Amino acid sequence: MAEIIPLPTKPAPRATRDPEPLWRDALGDQLRRLRHQRGERLADTADRAGVSPQYLSEMERGLKEPSSEMIAAVAGALDVTLVELTAAVAESLRAESLRAESLRAEASVAPARWAYLLAA
């Protein structure tokens, strides 16, 4: 006769992962970095882009989900193409992901190191 295997009453806990950064946050960081590299005030860039300084500020802080037209306008005001801006955002997300992965790997190894050191 077949063995009866009891089903778990609740789902197994999932490994907790840090939330991935949002694209809008990485975009905002890149826009702010580019504006600062140019030594511009928020109002100057916003004026050239045809957006309000408040809207540009919210974009930079990751509070807005700007349309592609808004992103293109601000990129143009900062003298970068959409391709350049998108590549920079993608690279910053990739770097952030690699940093987080490295920290997770280090955190999983650290307890084993301490156990080894304590046993020595």
Image (tube, rainbow, N blue to C red):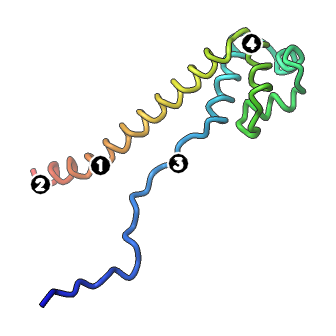
- In x, y percent, where is residue 3? 16, 86
Q: CA distance from mark 4 to mark 2?
A: 58 Å
- In x, y percent, where is residue 45? 82, 16
Q: Residue at x 64, y 19 (%)?
A: 85
Q: Are marks 4 and 3 in contact (CB under 8 Å)?
A: no
State which tag comes first along the sequence, 3 or 1: 3
Q: Secondary structure at mark 1?
A: helix
Q: Nearer the viewer, mark 3 or mark 1?
A: 3
- Residue 108, numbered circle: 1
- Residue 19, numbered circle: 3
Q: Secondary structure at mark 4?
A: loop
The residue that mark 2 highlights is 119
Q: CA distance from mark 2 to mark 1?
A: 18 Å
The residue nearer to you, when weighing 37 against 77, is 77
Q: CA distance from mark 3 to mark 1?
A: 18 Å
- Residue 55, numbered circle: none
Q: Secondary structure at mark 3?
A: loop
Residue type at tag 2: Ala
| Residue 110 to residue 72: above or below | below
Q: Residue at x 61, y 22 (%)?
A: 86
Residue type at tag 4: Leu
Q: CA distance from mark 4 to mark 3?
A: 30 Å
The residue that mark 4 highlights is 78
Q: Secondary structure at mark 2?
A: helix
